[in-house]
Image: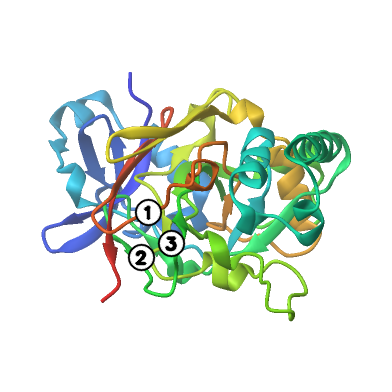
């Protein structure tokens, strides 16, 4: 049986929060719940109870829906991203794209550079805290929406990731408690202006995340939020992304170095996490930077994560 997820559809000229199972949808307003998903996440336990109590007869009678009608589930209040969190991904970035290297990296031979990157990643997995940054909620678009490639970006890149949706307000939680505050999981694509991450104009004081990450449409989100209980093991999911039918990312969340629990604990020590906040947990290997391939107008990205659905986002030049 397909897992039940929660999504937002354009139905009858308006957007509605729905429960989805397979190719069928039930508007949540018909259960006496709010009509928008962010409000429902604010009362997640109540929402989940009502959705889990939907009778089989109701699912049998439910109408089908057009996948093209699926919108972004909602716009989060806060979006956090964990960078450099997949071992193979970071090594591939450093080896494949000179713009992702520091001046110290440029002095190394390829062999020394790889050995250095591997050691740093192993040390990070064992000992480091997450490297987290903010991404603007205004970046969010739906799983079928167009990604606009800015005219002042030369290396727009994809980063399909496992998204974690916070279900309860939390502050100063431990890794052992962290999963108690998770509502569910979703597909996210942390689109990146790759060459703008590290500035080389003499004024750099660190990575420029605003320029590298927060252009409009740079966060396809959805198609749905799948409740935590329906995901047996978030560290055994396949992340797969293709561009124009060619597969680039095809990796497992098992390669994640700093766990979801450690990410939530770290963030909650610094900020108050709110219901609906979205954590992009890092991208596995297979970004365009590793191959010297970047997004072009007319490209179509298709990304899927086991059990969480599929995105299909065409790319277009900024007008």
- The residue that disc 2 covers is 149
The residue identified by callout 3 is 218
Of the two numbered discs 3 and 2 on the same chain, state the one appearing first in sequence: 2
| Label 2 residue SS | strand
Residue 13, percent from left and from top: 12, 64
Say if mark 1 contacts mark 2, CB within 8 Å: yes
Where on the picture, by quarter, is residue 60? top left
Residue 78 seen in render: no
For the residues labelled 1 and 2, the Cα–Cα distance comes to 8 Å
Q: Residues within 10 Å of mark 2 (few under 14, many from 20)?
A: many
Quadrant in the rendering for residue 180: top right
Q: Earlier in the sequence, mark 1 or mark 2?
A: 2
* Residue 280 vs residue 274, the one in the foreground: 280
The picture quadrant where one finds residue 153 is: bottom left
3D distance between C-alphas at marks 3 and 2: 9 Å
Q: Which residue is mark 1?
A: 295
Nearer the observer, 52 or 294: 294
Please tell me whether residue 211 is drawn above or below residue 31 in the rendered image: below
């Amino acid at each position: 049986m397909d897992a039940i997820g929660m999504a937002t559809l354009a139905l009858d000229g308006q957007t509605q929060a729905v429960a989805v199972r397979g190719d069928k949808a039930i508007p949540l307003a018909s259960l006496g719940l709010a009509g928008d998903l962010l409000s429902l996440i604010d009362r997640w336990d109540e929402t989940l109870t009502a959705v889990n109590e939907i009778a089989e007869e109701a699912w049998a009678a439910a109408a089908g829906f057009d996948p093209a009608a699926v919108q972004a589930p909602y716009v989060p209040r806060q979006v956090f991203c964990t960078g450099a969190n997949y071992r193979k991904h970071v090594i591939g970035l450093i080896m494949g794209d000179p713009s992702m290297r520091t001046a110290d990296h440029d002095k190394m031979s390829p062999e020394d550079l790889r050995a250095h990157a591997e050691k740093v990643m192993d040390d990070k997995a064992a000992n480091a805290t997450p490297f987290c940054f903010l991404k603007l909620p205004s970046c969010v678009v739906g799983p079928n929406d167009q990604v606009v490639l800015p005219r002042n970006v030369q290396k727009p890149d994809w980063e399909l990731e496992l998204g974690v949706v916070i279900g309860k307000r939390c502050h100063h939680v431990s890794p052992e408690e962290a999963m108690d505050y998770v509502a569910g999981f979703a597909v996210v694509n942390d689109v990146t202006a790759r060459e703008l991450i590290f500035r080389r104009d003499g004024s750099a004081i660190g990575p420029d995340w605003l320029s590298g990450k927060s252009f409009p449409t740079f966060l396809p989100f959805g198609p749905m939020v799948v409740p935590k209980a329906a995901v047996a093991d978030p560290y055994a999911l396949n992340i797969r992304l293709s561009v124009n039918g060619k597969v680039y990312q095809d990796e497992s969340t098992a390669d994640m170095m700093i766990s979801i629990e450690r990410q939530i604990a770290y963030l909650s020590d610094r900020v108050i996490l709110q219901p609906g906040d979205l954590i992009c947990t890092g991208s596995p290997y297979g970004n365009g930077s590793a191959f010297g391939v970047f997004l072009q107008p007319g490209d179509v990205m298709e990304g899927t994560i086991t059990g969480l659905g599929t995105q299909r986002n065409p790319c277009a030049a900024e007008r």
